[in-house]
Image (cartoon, grey):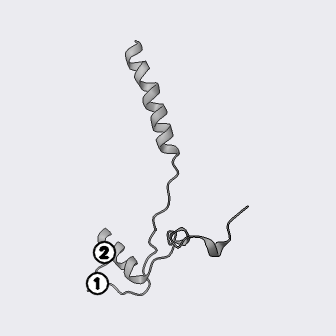
Amino acid sequence: MSIHSSLRGANSLVGERSVWTRVERLQALQKKGKFDPEKDSVYGLPKVRTKFKVAGKKKKAKEEGEAGAAPAEGGE
């Protein structure tokens, strides 16, 4: 049985946002050196990619790679 959405904790409803505000986009572009406040306009800004969650499969593959590599080095 699932829990009603009104009974969930406040933190469980907060997720990563897929859209940034203009200020956040400007900060990201300034860090990359693609925006100069004195020369460029705040209108018509290029798209800025947000952070995405990465699946945990890389750790598992990395562990298997280390386990497989150790016997091969010491075996021959």
Q: Residues within 10 Å of mark 2 (few under 14, many from 20)?
A: few
Q: Position of residue 45 (x, y in %)?
A: 42, 80
Left or right of 52: which side holds 29?
left
Going by the numbered disc 2, the residue's amino acid type is Gln
Cβ–Cβ below 8 Å for labels 2 and 1? yes
Pick the residue in front: 51 or 36. 51
Pick the residue in front: 43 or 55. 55
Q: Indicate whether 46 appears above or below 50.
A: below
Secondary structure, mark 1, is: loop
Q: Give whichever of discs 2 and 1 has the lower sequence position.
A: 2
Going by the numbered disc 1, the residue's amino acid type is Pro
Q: Indicate whether 40 appears above or below 48.
A: below
Q: Which numbered dot is residue 74? A: none
- Position of the N terminus by quadrant: bottom right
| Identity of the residue furthest to the right in this view | 1
Total marks shown come to 2
Secondary structure, mark 2, is: helix
Disc 1: which residue: 37
Disc 2: which residue: 30
Pick the residue in front: 72 or 1. 1
Q: Position of residue 74 (x, y in %)?
A: 38, 16
Cα distance between the residues tagged 2 and 1: 8 Å
| Identity of the residue furthest to the top in this view | 76
At 53% from the left and 44% from the top, the residue drawn is 57
Pick the residue in front: 45 or 31. 31
At 65% from the left and 72% from the top, the residue drawn is 5
